[in-house]
Image (tube, grey):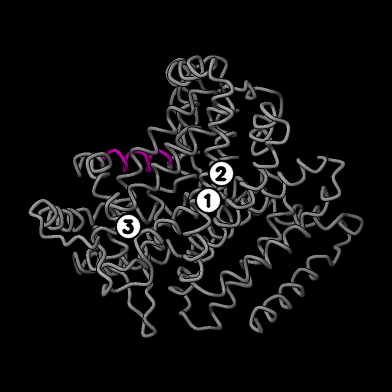
Amino acid sequence: MHRFNQLSLRLMVLLMSLTLPASALAEAKLDEKINTTLKPLLDAVTSFVFTSFNIGGVGIPFVLAWLILAAIIFTLYFRFINLRAMGLGFKLIRGDFDDPDSVGEVSHFQALATALSGTVGLGNIAGVAIAVSLGGPGATFWMILAGLLGMSSKFIECTLGVKYRQENADGSVSGGPMYYLSKGLAERSDKLKGLGKVLAVMFAIFCIGGSFGGGNMFQANQSFLQLVTVTGGENSWFADKGWLFGLVVAAIVGMVIIGGIRSIAKVTSKLVPFMAVIYVLTGLIIILMNYSAVPAALVSIVSGAFSPEGIAGGFVGVLIQGIQRAAFSNEAGIGSAAIAHSAVKTNEPVTEGLVALYEPFIDTVVICTVTALVIIVTGSYGTGDVSGVALTSMAFESAISWFPIVLTVAVILFAFSTMISWSYYGLKAWGYLFGESKAASNTYKLMFLVFVVIGSSMQLGAVINFSDAMIFAMAFPNIIGLYFLLPVVKKELNAYWKKYKSGELVRQN
């Protein structure tokens, strides 16, 4: 607690420095100062990451083509592992073959819950709403397809995360793309050693940026917006107090992240199932209340995916919206989840890859689809300038007036769980670059908490663009490494699958 008080004091000092007025901003409010100062920088980063090429007059970000092409190749290379191994993956999550003496810090279920808490967040609520409002119902089809294909990407990166993790002297472990890029490529060939180190450093830098952006600022921004919406909108007492909301959230997040992965896993293993059930059940209730509109909604999802009308960019525009939102939501191919999965207790790396198959499925195929259907069956999309979490909130409210309160609880829980998981991702990337000393760890945690406040105080557009840019940038070094390491994963899979089919695996219950 003493350590937390020190962090809180430093946080307050930094936040006070943000209030020092420049001449042009002397009369501006704190929230406006933060947004005006940082927006130009965030816009520049976004423009660089999302370099596009044109097809039929529509700009397609190269990084999206990079992600979806890799997911297709991985799915074919492993003969649809995303579908044929889900049964085994479920048994592993259940703990059927756990070995209590294995190296690691958390169980398969806890690792999955921690990684899910980093992906099941406001991308499922606000991101889906953005995709549907910009791309129409058809974007949902491409979102689901991207989620199914992304399961294969997640399988590979999480297997590698465990295989090349680093066991620390204190019994903790550090893993993720930083380690499998540097160690894995060096193991493959001396000629790849230098490339592996460069890719690892690039990934670590982007991961830190992603932890501040999509894993932090976006979550704080959208949860604050939902709080304002249910407390009176522009007339809400909270309307211009994003910084205050950020301070409260930063204090709560700080108390959890100081305890490290075991503390985070204890929280997420209880919080993720609870919040997912609340949100999905609430969504299903609304869908059932509008059951007569469901057939038409399903038809519009499929027909809109291939023959959209009135949507900017036509077919390509709809496809881009669906894939972009799915990628941001489930992070398959990004590499982030491999950091959480690396802490699992197992001596068989491929087991965690099989467990990780469920991440994109739960995140995108289930939760994102529920959100999209709620928005479509209630007829809420296409209603003016409403987008993001406000659109989802309007869809919930159209069914039952007090449902936005339930949504607000879900939004804040989603945001909180995502922030604590991404703090761990960023911390491990930070530790890879600067060492895992207490001083380095506390420096990162302090910075992370400051960005909670900044995210609460910024306008949606700048936050979303920066969030996308940093997280998608991680895909470039990560996927290059995955291509080189595919044979390593195939060898691990074949060996474990043989044990499974021969009955060599010992059931624990």
The one of 410 and 187 positioned closer to us in this rendering: 410
* Sequence-wise first label, 2 or 3: 3
At a point 53% along the width and 30% down the height, the residue shown is 372
Does the magenta stretch mainly form a helix, a strand or a loop? helix
Q: Are marks 1 and 2 in contact (CB under 8 Å)?
A: yes
Give the numbered dot on residue 274: 1
- Residue depth check, mark 2 versus mark 3: number of the one nearer the observer: 2
Q: How many marks?
A: 3
Residue 375 lies in magenta, yes or no? no
* Sequence-wise first label, 1 or 3: 3
Badge 1: residue crowd in 10 Å (few <14, some 14–19, many ≥20): few
Farthest right residue in view: 27
Please give the residue where the numbered disc 2 appears in the rendered image: 278
Give the numbered dot on residue 158: 3
Vertical position of residue 197 compared to residue 411: above or below: below
Please report the bounds of the magenta region as a residue range.
64-74
